[in-house]
Image (cartoon, rainbow, N blue to C red):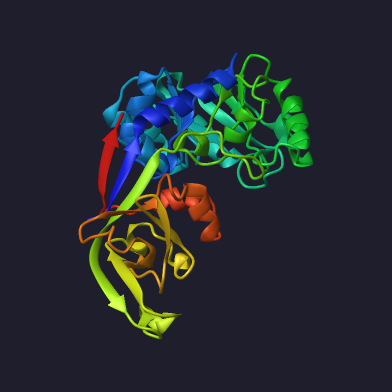
Amino acid sequence: MSRYTIDLGALASNYRKLAAAAQPGDCGAVVKANAYGLGAVEVVGRLLDEGCREFFVATIGEAEALRRAYAEPTLYVLGGADRDHVDRFIAADAIPVINHADELDAWRGRGQPRRQPVAIHVDTGMNRLGFDHAQMSAIDLRDIEVALLLSHFACADEPEHPMNALQRERFDVVRRAFPDVRASMANSGTVLGGAAAAHDLCRPGIALYGGNPFADRPNPMQAVVRFEAKVLQLREIQHDDSVGYGATYRARGKRLIATVDAGYADGVPRLLGNLGIAGVAGVRVPFVGRVSMDLTTLDVSEVAGRIALGDWVELIGETVGIDEVAALARTISYEILTGLGHRSERVYRG
């Protein structure tokens, strides 16, 4: 069985770095998609120990799962609240991030027991969710308790991108109409890029989990995830022998092939076939052949004599980092993390 080792100590260290950069504002945490695949209950528990009290999820179901585990944190639901889910928000004591007028009407129409607050999402240029920044003055919020005003950067991983300044200007205009409401726009890249001071509540995501929040800078965060698979079989093949589905790999000379017990069902991207890199005792070895559902094949000729059945091979970790894996698979670290499978063993430490 393959395994993921999740270093909660590294997670905590990353949070402390982000919280320090967020001062004098507060630092929350984005824990949607099961904390980017690492386990929301475990991640939130560790961050509560570090003093984090505000968490962002995507759906009411994610909020309910966390509320069953923890009574104390403030939970914001980024996906909003439609008419069918208002009662669930009340029961879970979760704060909906209201994105448009229909959601606002649905919330207003239920009487809001305990005057439960909402957050208001302002679209400043992403053009996904949120009220148009230019039309905020027309929204009737007189009977609504607004706990947070938020927006979202489109290009935070590129701190010098002109879109960032434009979005800040638009958000600042809206904020002036809500002088007593806390504001939140800074995500991982904005916090670490030095622009967090203007925000009351920062909400980092990928940086917490060890991914690089920048497109053009070295990663300042500690690695949190190690993904390993066991060697199931070692096979010596001859010149021109093929490996895997489609016979896409042909050996050039005699090679030693290791088959390990993780495939695309476990979070190894299929695109890494004949492209990926694994680590064996600190030595980088190539993927050969296609990645299949349950298995991946590696050319371990360079470590012959130093690898045996049952050994662990690193697929993400110190030898091959999460961002390199993502780049090889032509994607981003977010997708790699959230694509981690559910059948692998999970080991938490720290």
x and y percentages locating residue 30 in the rendered image: 47, 34
Foreground of the two, 93 or 251? 251
Location of the N terminus by quadrant is bottom left
Residue 129 against residue 265 in the figure, above or below: above
x and y percentages locating residue 60 in the rendered image: 40, 39
- Outermost residue, bottom direction? 240
Q: Residue at x 41, y 38 (%)?
A: 224
- The number of numbered discs placed on residues in the rendered structure image is 0
Occupied quadrant, residue 194 = top right
Occupied quadrant, residue 10 = top left
Residue 265 against residue 248 in the figure, above or below: above
Occupied quadrant, residue 295 = bottom left
Instruction: Residue 144: tell me if it is visible.
Output: no
Q: Residue at x 71, y 36 (%)?
A: 159
Instruction: Residue 318: tell me if it is visible.
Output: yes
Foreground of the two, 109 or 132? 132
Location of the C terminus by quadrant is top left
x and y percentages locating residue 170 in the rendered image: 76, 32
User: Seen in the image, is 31 located left or right of residue 202?
Assistant: left
Residue 254 against residue 113 in the figure, above or below: below
x and y percentages locating residue 318 in the rendered image: 42, 44
Foreground of the two, 283 or 342? 283
User: Seen in the image, is 168 located left or right of residue 5?
Assistant: right
Q: Residue at x 27, y 59 (%)?
A: 307
Residue 90 against residue 233 in the figure, above or below: above
User: Seen in the image, is 168 located left or right of residue 76?
Assistant: right
